[in-house]
Amino acid sequence: MNRDRSTYTGLPRKEIDWFPKIDYEKCNPEECNYHCVNFCPFGVFSKDANGKVKVSQPYECNVGDESCKFQCPLGAIKFPTREELKMMLRKLREKYQK
Ligand code: SF4
């Protein structure tokens, strides 16, 4: 799939802090068999050499999409709130779209 993820509605994607964060107190890939790694079609998650799950390509994540959070059986995936996302986008629009 050819995707240009460098911008989101004209804003630089790398300045938008929207991506999953893993709560390692809860994450247990042996229990879910790396469900998030297998679920995300954009390769946001990966498994490192020690079997730990990492958010290795955060800016490949779709802004506003938190579907993986609902897939994690252990509730170990977190995202910013909708309100935080709105504020982030508002600030960036003020910065770039004056
Ligand atoms: S689905 Fe949840 S428990 Fe499983 S590897 Fe991902 S974050 Fe960890």
Image (cartoon, rainbow, N blue to C red):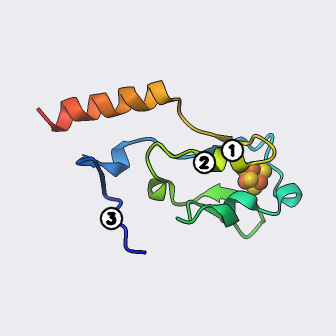
- The response on whether ligand 1 sits within 8 Å of label 3 is no
Identity, as a three-letter code, of the amino acid under mark 1: Phe
Q: Where is residue 23 in the image (x, y as percent from the top left)?
A: 72, 41
The disc at residue 21 is none
Q: Residue at x 83, y 57 (%)?
A: 32
Local SS, label 2: helix
Q: Is residue 50 above or below residue 54?
A: below
**Location of residue 22 (image quadrant):** top right
Between disc 2 and disc 3, whose residue precedes?
3
Residue identified by numbered label 2: 67
What residue is rendered at 46% in x and 24% in y?
A: 83
Numbered disc in front, either 2 or 3: 2
In the picture, the quarter occupied by the N terminus is bottom left
The disc placed on residue 4 is: 3
78 left or right of 83 in image: right
Q: Does the residue labelled 1 lie within 8 Å of ligand 1?
A: no
Q: Is residue 11 visible?
A: yes
Residue 91: x, y in percent?
28, 29
Residue that badge 1 annotates? 70
Q: What is the distance, in whole Å, between disc 2 and disc 1 at their CAs?
A: 6 Å
User: In this orientation, which residue lies closer to the viewer: 86 or 21?
Assistant: 86
Q: Do the residues labelled 2 and 1 touch (CB within 8 Å)?
A: yes
Mark 3 vs mark 1, CA separation in Å: 26 Å
- Which numbered disc flags the more N-terminal residue, 3 or 1? 3
In the image, residue 71 lies at what x, y percent? Answer: 71, 50
Q: What element carries label 3?
A: loop
Q: From where the camera sits, is residue 47 visible?
A: no
Q: How crowded is mark 3: few (under 14 residues within 10 Å), some or many (20 or more)?
A: few
